[in-house]
Image: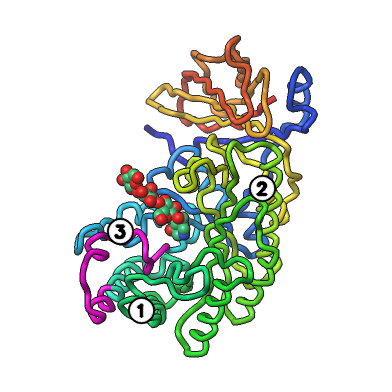
Amino acid sequence: MRTSRSSLRVRLTALLTGAAMTGAALTGALAGTAHAADAPLRDLAAAKGKVMGTAVTGSKLTGTYGEIAAREFNALTPGNAMKWGSVEPTRGTFDWAEADQIVDFAEASGQQVRGHTLVWHSQNPSWLTNGTWTPAQLSGLMNDHIALEVGRYKGRLATWDVVNEPFNEDGTYRQTLWYNGLGADYIAQALTAARAADPAAKLYINDYNVEGVNAKSTALYNLVKSLKERGVPIDGVGLQAHLILGQVPSTLQQNIQRFADLGVDVAITELDIRMQLPSDSTKLTRQAADYKAVMAACVAVARCVGVTVWGFTDSDSWIPSTFPGQGAATPYDENYAPKPAYAAIAEALGGTTTPPTGACTATYSVSSQWNTGFTGQVRIACSGAALSSWKVGWTFGAGQQVTQAWNATCAQTGSAVSCSNASYNGTVPDGGSVTFGFNGSWSGSNPVPVVTLG
Ligand code: G3I
């Protein structure tokens, strides 16, 4: 295999008007409005001095998933890989493979990393949760864990979620291994240990249901205020933002501002907006407005450093397994087609895209390559739109030649290739996709062409 992850896929987005979503008018309308995607979210965010991040799963950082993660985001958060249960499943036996992989990927992609998470009540190893510990032992375990994990990535991670989810909904402290053993001071201890292990990393407390002004966020506010007054190292507050469709708190910006006024940074750390399935265009439009409102609140406050989505594709979201019947919570659907929420994020970051009522995309990839030949495929996926026939074209840049195609009729004239649907796969329904494949020859190099759908 000589293929490289980053060079394999090129995506063009064809924006469809609502009127063009059905029937015979479609082909012409699609051809007339097809255009290259706007600037990636990470560029739009960077221009505003903001972070646009995503949680990722290390094993998926290849193919289209890896390409979108690298292209669209300037920060990554390991969704699970850095949790205590992941890195030290057996006491004294460590597994850093996925965490290292994500950090390496981020560095290769010019992205920062948000470490997640050091001290939490969940996803701890069973040897830790099942043990009986004196306060001194517990404190030693916590401090050693922080020193080891933060120390391992010293200088490489921008940020750590040091303490995760310390509060109950009513603003009292959650009764956890840490609170029960060490009292509320475990939070100050953990922050102090993290600062010692990597003085350059920004240290955060992260929680959910603290996006608006309420009892829980006020408890967090009071904690941060008192930590600041005591000189405990605290740099920021993470508002997770696992939100429900139509329920962005009206006090979000005000809440961000009040934390900023304490002299700490604020980050939206785990944004997703779930809905009852199935999704439809009304819900997706509402979701786009909700995403935009969250982004706008962050953009409006200088000390809001940015927004991280908790998975960028519906195929990599925790929602469906935790909330049966709900989902579609992220900006891309399961087939990696950007949803209206994607355009809404871009718009809130100053992009020029108007939210599409639907989109179909064509994605070219090389699935294998050998000394003289290669196998390629093109996937056409639709979300909020549909096709009754399709035609895909590209121009090879290095003398490649299509030798055989399947699931499409392809012709090549010079370097120009044109492929149209077979009799049985012209229909691409809303939420569906069609893939066709081909073999080709190459020599010297095999650069990925720009594909048009029209
Ligand atoms: O790795 C095992 C796999 O070996 C096994 O086959 C499979 C069977 O269930 O489980 C896999 O582990 C799952 C793990 O995610 C990795 O996929 C766990 O069951 C599952 O519980 C775990 O869920 C994670 C959840 O935290 C745990 O609370 C989610 O992926 C992760 O997105 C989620 O993230 C949290 C943040 O850390 C903190 N804020 C809330 C957020 C959502 O719960």
The quarter holding residue 278 reads top right
Local secondary structure at mark 3: helix
Q: Residue furthest front?
A: 170
Question: For the magenta stretch, what is the residue range?
Answer: 116-141
Q: Are marks 3 and 1 in contact (CB under 8 Å)?
A: no
Quickly name the residue at label 1. Answer: 193
Q: Which residue is mark 2?
A: 287
| Sequence-wise first label, 2 or 1 | 1
Local crowd at mark 2 within 10 Å, few (<14), some, or many (≥20)? many
Mark carried by residue 85:
3
Measuring 49% from the left and 61% from the top, which residue is drawn there?
112
Compared to residue 65, the image places residue 176 above or below, namely below
- Asked if residue 132 lies in the magenta stretch, the reply is yes
* Left or right of 19 in this view: 246: left
How much space separates mark 3 and mark 1, taking CA atoms?
A: 19 Å
Give the CA distance from mark 3 to mark 2: 33 Å
Residue sitting nearer the eye, 168 or 100: 168
Residue 52 in percent (x, y) is at 58, 57
Q: Pick whichever, 342 or 38, lies toward us.
A: 342
Crowd band around label 3 with a 10 angstrom C-alpha radius: few (<14), some (14–19), many (20+)? many
State the SS at label 2: helix
Percent position (x, y) of residue 145? 29, 70
- Asked if the residue under mark 1 is in contact with the one under mark 2, i.e. CB atoms within 8 Å, the reply is no
Disc 1 marks a residue whose amino acid type is: Ala
Q: Amino acid at mark 3?
A: Gly
- Viewer-proximal residue among 248 and 302: 248
Please say if 385 is above or below 181.
above
